[in-house]
Image: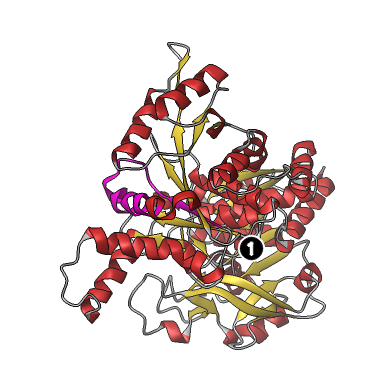
Amino acid sequence: MADTKYIFVTGGVVSSLGKGIISSSIGKLLQSRGYNITIQKFDPYINIDPGTLNPYEHGECYVTVDGMETDLDLGHYERFTGIKTTRANSLTTGRIYKAVIDKERRGDYLGKTIQVVPHITDEIKRNIRYLGDKHHYDFVITEIGGTIGDIESAPFLEAIRQMKWELGRNAVCIHLTYIPYLKAAGELKTKPTQHSVKELQSVGIQPDILVLRTEKHLNGDILRKVASFCNVDIDCVVQSEDLPSIYEVPVNMQNQGLDTAILRKLNCEVGPTPSLGPWKKFLEKKNNATAEVVIGLVGKYDLQDAYKSIREGLSQAGTYNDHKTVLQFVNSESLTEENIGDALAGLDGVVICPGFGQRGIEGKIVAAHYTRTHNIPTFGICLGMQMMVIEFARNVLGYKDANSREMDAKTPHNVIDIMEEQKTITDMGGTMRLGAYECTLKQGSRVFDIYKSEHIQERHRHRYEFNNDYQTEYERAGMQCVGRNPESNLVEIVEIPGLKWYVGTQFHPEYQSTVLSPHPLFVDFVRASIENRKNNQ
């Protein structure tokens, strides 16, 4: 293909319809036809990135290999397609405006009055085109966050309008809307979709393809009605029904010819429909798994999206171990030495979740103590690993006042300390140790056997580290430092070899677990949890 093709995904009626899943599914289907694709997310909020947002506001913060804090949809893009996203795949209104203001301050605009059109829209267009121009992708899929009609998204829609006009047959707009079911009337209603398309048309964009989110199956009459009222070809109206798993969406979209419609609209050769063999094998394994393994997530955010990548990583690992992973949230704020036994009863394995700040950390320490002393498979991630280290210092090394400098700046036993280069940083956003770093594994360790490699790369998001001054004491007492960054000598992984599975990682392995390439740490942790379940029956 000579020219990069651009696919714009917008949403209407309500938010949270699953634009990220649809964008990921389109990417997967085009990949399966041999095309080279990438997916980017444009978020209309003014924050520079979601790194400083509370997970209750925005779900988890996903981190790219080059250290950009991004929206959780980039996790879906990577899990579905196996691509590696970067800072160029995630833009916000804040970053767009900052780039324009920085140019204005440098004098790049030669004294012009800076306006939304053309300066902001030109910056948006430049960023939409950037990946296609630089890497010559066959397809660039651009998801616009928010909902049509939001005041914040107006500049993005104007940029799309212009690009569709400029690119002609090299661009399509896919609009995701909602068909609600009114239980009292027993009817599905198309009016919200009609209004949503009308709103899109009012800013000069005619959608080429409609994806209708629905809880009930839509019959041909409804699809024809939508096509007719919205000026869309009937074979370009597809429905996205509720499915047992998000991973069934690509197959559902393929069955309705979504990828065929896209290729036809973009003047591409359609060719035979690919088989999606490995993907369907994964779904088969997932659907055939009946035995359960119950994993507890010890954390402070009682919200599904707050630990999205961890949940997906564990679910994938369960599938590859021929088990259904049942996840049980355990609120660390309410955990005490008195109730911990009841709180963790019936769990086959425990993940001590990442996070920031004081709230809920004592509960995580209590959980680490209980799982260590009761030999329950335990996986500590980032802050979770640090809590395992603090617990060990307090209850094995005898330093009852051991803590992290993050929680207690004056602790005499700072077994977790702030990194040297972080001490002078005052801004919160985008200033942590972020992105992929090298790690060398100790031969003969559990993690070496799991990775089957001495050199690995994993993604980070933190300011505080294991204090190497205490390393000898820890190792003498049984907690081994088995993974290190070769340049800084920072400890990346700790484990206790004598236990069934007790591993803490300073990095976030969940960011690298995909549907067709599950993360080895999650796969092995879930396998150990299954063994633990069998032994306890």
Q: Position of residue 173 (x, y in %)?
A: 45, 44
Q: Residues within 10 Å of mark 1 (few under 14, many from 20)?
A: many
Q: Nearer the viewer, residue 294 or 70?
A: 70
Question: From where the camera sits, is residue 290 visible?
Answer: no
Q: How many marks?
A: 1
Q: Residue 158 in magenta?
A: yes
Quarter of the N terminus within the rendering: bottom right
Q: Secondary structure at mark 1?
A: helix
Q: Position of residue 110 (x, y in %)?
A: 19, 77
Q: Nearer the viewer, residue 238 or 224?
A: 224
- Which residue corresponds to mark 1? 512
Residue 424 sits above or below residue 344 on the image: below
Span of residues in magenta? 139-163
Residue 497 sits above or below residue 313 on the image: below
Q: Residue at x 72, y 42 (%)?
A: 273
Q: Residue at x 72, y 54 (%)?
A: 516
